[in-house]
């Protein structure tokens, strides 16, 4: 009976997806998953047999870009893959993506699933685990996760729960430079890390004060020989805990619009901005190398990668080049702020819906002081526009240069009509979803 329900849920998923595309009533990133789980609660259990190798990506920042990049490199290497490309990473979103893409008359070589940290264990209850890539652990959505140790426990519980068809826990692809990530326990661990970072094009190299709050898992302060951003770097502790030796070592050069990664003597050009994206690419390349994808294919296919909406994506608003960078916590915001062109026209959109996190106190930890060097008006929008305006005031920006337009669509229209140069938009997650529906933001001029 349950198997029959599985096939019925697949049929309904594809029918509803088709109708949503025609009517454009919804992006359909999780609503289909909710319906599928109502009909077939064990959907993921039945989906297992259609996918040979299952890959999950989790962590605080970079999940969507990293999983998208892994999926792209697999697909361009002529392998079949299922991916939740839109970034809906809770259980309904994962089921949504698989049910819409899965063909019951076909076997897929890979699935690459971005997974919310708190939902990884729930996903692994029914879905087999072959590889798990963990990007980083930063303070994020304190109302949902609490402190970092809570997030770490969520992921470790998922690792312990996850098994593949041979009964083994997943192979872990871990960021050696993040002390918490490197400390995850597993049967088989592969580390990637950065050896040196060099900045070109006059880019900002300032470090954040937020990072100084981080300590070793034992509770003692960490000593750093090198620190790249946040707690990521070359660390050690008096207790003996230290950065593990990475299998994949990168020397990184950051340019204004791209990065060059020299990994174990091989050079890769990554068409993404910022050190945070270089880390995402390093993790993705390490995983693809573990899968056996050849270096020449990875190098070739990196250039054609298109980021997910709002993750360092370029759009055009009234013909003006518009960079959209998702922000959702202090560390992520600080790294995005380092990439802001201070000659551009800036729009910051802050919501506090459940998916954003109700607690917006992180605005006071993020270093918005870097944008007080711009002489242009800064527009703030969203549910917590006034909070953002207050934060900018205390960042040293004159009040007459801060314009509050709470309605997101009206704010976008205002910026598009009044911008005299390029535009930068920094939205939270649900604000990003709203932006995705605004027709004036186009893919080309």
Image (cartoon, rainbow, N blue to C red):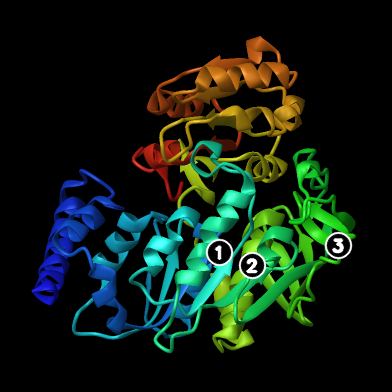
Location of mark 3 (residue): 239
Residue lying at 86% horizontally and 60% vertically, measured from the top left? 237
> Above or below — where is 417 with respect to 95?
above
Residue 184 image label: 2
Q: Is residue 375 left or right of residue 359?
A: right
Question: In which quadrant of the rendered view does residue 325 lie?
Answer: top right
Asked whether the residues under the numbered discs 3 and 2 touch, taking CB atoms below 8 Å apart as contact, a structural biologist would say: no
Position of residue 386 measured from the top left corner of the image (x, y, whole percent): 53, 17
Q: Residue 272 versus residue 131: which sits nearer the camera? A: 131
Residue count near mark 2 (Cα–Cα under 10 Å), binned few <14, some 14–19, many ≥20: some
The residue under the point 75% across, 18% down is: 396
| Distance of label 2 from label 1 (alpha carbons) | 7 Å
Q: Earlier in the sequence, mark 1 or mark 3?
A: 1
| CA gap, disc 3 and disc 2 | 17 Å
Report if residue 269 is visible in the image. Answer: yes
Q: Residue at x 69, y 32 (%)?
A: 365
Which residue does the numbered mark 1 point to in the structure image? 156
Contact (Cβ within 8 Å) of mark 2 with mark 1: yes
Residue ID at (43%, 89%) = 166
Task: Give the mark nearest the N terminus, 3 or 2.
Answer: 2
Where residue 118 appears, x then y in whole percent? 47, 54
**Picture layout, residue 250 above or below residue 36:** below
421, 56: nearer the viewer: 56
């Amino acid at each position: 009976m349950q198997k029959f329900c599985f096939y019925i849920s697949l049929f309904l998923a594809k029918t509803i997806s088709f109708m949503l595309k025609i009517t454009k009533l919804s992006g359909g990133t999780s609503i289909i998953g909710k319906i599928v789980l109502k009909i077939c609660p064990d959907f993921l259990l039945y989906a297992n047999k259609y996918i040979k190798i299952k890959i999950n990506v989790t962590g605080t920042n970079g999940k969507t870009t990293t999983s998208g990049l892994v999926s792209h490199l697999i697909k361009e290497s002529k392998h079949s893959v299922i991916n939740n490309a839109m970034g809906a990473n809770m259980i309904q979103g994962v089921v949504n993506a698989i049910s819409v893409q899965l063909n019951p008359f076909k076997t897929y070589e890979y699935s690459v699933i971005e997974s919310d940290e708190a939902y990884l264990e729930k996903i692994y209850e029914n879905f087999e685990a072959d590889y798990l890539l963990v990007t980083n652990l930063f303070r994020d959505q304190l109302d949902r996760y609490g402190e970092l140790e809570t997030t770490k426990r969520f992921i470790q519980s998922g690792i312990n729960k996850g098994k593949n068809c041979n009964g083994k826990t997943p192979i872990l692809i871990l960021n050696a430079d993040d002390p918490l990530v490197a400390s995850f326990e597993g049967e088989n661990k592969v580390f990637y890390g950065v050896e040196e970072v060099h900045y070109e094009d006059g880019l900002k190299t300032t470090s954040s004060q937020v990072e100084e709050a981080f300590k070793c898992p034992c509770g003692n302060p960490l000593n750093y020989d090198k620190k790249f951003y946040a707690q990521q770097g070359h660390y050690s502790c008096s207790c003996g805990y230290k950065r593990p030796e990475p299998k994949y070592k990168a020397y990184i050069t950051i340019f204004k619009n791209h990065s060059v990664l020299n990994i174990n003597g091989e050079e890769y050009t990554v068409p993404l901005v910022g050190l945070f994206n270089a880390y995402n690419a390093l993790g993705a390349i390490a995983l693809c190398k573990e899968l056996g994808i050849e270096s020449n294919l990875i190098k070739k296919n990196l250039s054609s990668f298109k980021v997910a909406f709002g993750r360092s994506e370029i759009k055009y608003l009234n013909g003006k080049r518009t960079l959209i960078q998702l922000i959702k916590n202090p560390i992520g915001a600080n790294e995005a702020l380092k990439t802001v062109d201070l000659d551009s026209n800036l729009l910051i959109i802050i919501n506090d819906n459940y998916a954003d996190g109700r607690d917006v106190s992180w605005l006071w930890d993020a270093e918005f002081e870097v944008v007080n060097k711009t002489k242009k008006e800064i527009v703030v929008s969203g549910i917590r526009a006034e909070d953002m305006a207050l934060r900018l005031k205390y960042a040293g920006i004159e009040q007459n240069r801060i314009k509050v337009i709470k309605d997101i669509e009206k704010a976008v229209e205002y910026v598009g009509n009044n911008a005299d140069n390029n535009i930068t938009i920094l939205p939270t997650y649900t604000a990003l979803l709203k932006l995705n529906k605004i027709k004036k933001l186009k893919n080309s001029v």
